[in-house]
Amino acid sequence: MLQQGLRDLSAWVEAGVRPAQTRYRVDDARIELPAAASERGGVQPVVSLLANGGPRADVEAGETVGFEARVELPPSCGRLVAAEWDFDGSGTFAESERLDLSDRHIVLTRQATYSESGTHFAVVRVTTQRNPGTRYGRVQNLARARVVVSERGTSP
């Protein structure tokens, strides 16, 4: 994000091209952003992650969980170039895919099976880039979903 910000600053100073505007509101020292990328603006994608259709999935060990990442791109962020998945919240994004998508609304799906009981935080991290073909100027955002896994036969 810093690299893209510096590129935008350079374009503004050198060529008069104003950077993308981000709409926000300050309420009692909190910054509130619109939920939709089209209303928010800026350069960062908006992403949400659902597990079995909601922000939390309660499953038994061995059960497969379906994940749905909903990504919305603001007009000035470019293309969706990568998605990475970390199903156990370890920070290790074991599954990744290179993409080249310019649609403003994108849905990505995956499945994972949990064998160990406990609470797991699945994460999807998406990357956009205005000028694909280089490793610079990439902007990321992520979303999490909670998966609560109980031992077989003990789910609520």
Image (cartoon, rainbow, N blue to C red):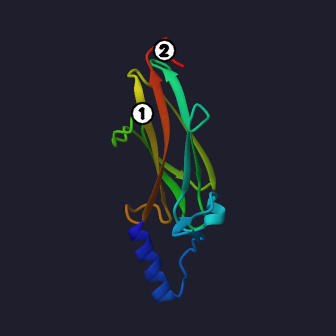
Number of the label disc, if any, that sits on residue 154? 2
Mark 2 residue element: loop
* Residue 131 x, y percent position in the rendering: 48, 65
**Which residue type carries mark 2?**
Thr
Q: In the rendered image of this protein, does residue 81 appear above or below residue 152?
A: below
Asked if 118 appears above or below 84 in the picture, the reply is: above
Give the Cα distance between marks 2 and 1.
17 Å
Q: How many marks?
A: 2
Q: Amino acid at mark 1?
A: His
Residue furthest to the front: 28
Q: Which mark is residue 87?
A: none
Indicate the secondary structure of the residue bearing disc 1: strand
Q: Residues within 10 Å of mark 1 (few under 14, many from 20)?
A: many
Return the residue at label 1: 120
Residue 90 located left or right of residue 63:
left
The N terminus: image quadrant:
bottom left
The structure residue drawn at horizontal position 42% and vertical position 33%, both measured from the top left corner, is 120
Q: Residue furthest top?
A: 153
Q: Is residue 109 above or below residue 46?
A: above
Q: Residues within 10 Å of mark 2 (few under 14, many from 20)?
A: few
N-term-proximal mark, 2 vs 1: 1
Image quadrant of residue 102? bottom right
Q: Is residue 67 visible?
A: no
Horizontal and vertical percent position of residue 51:
55, 34
* Residue depicted at 41% across the width and 76% down the height: 6
**What residue is shown at x 52% (from left), y 66% (from top)?**
30
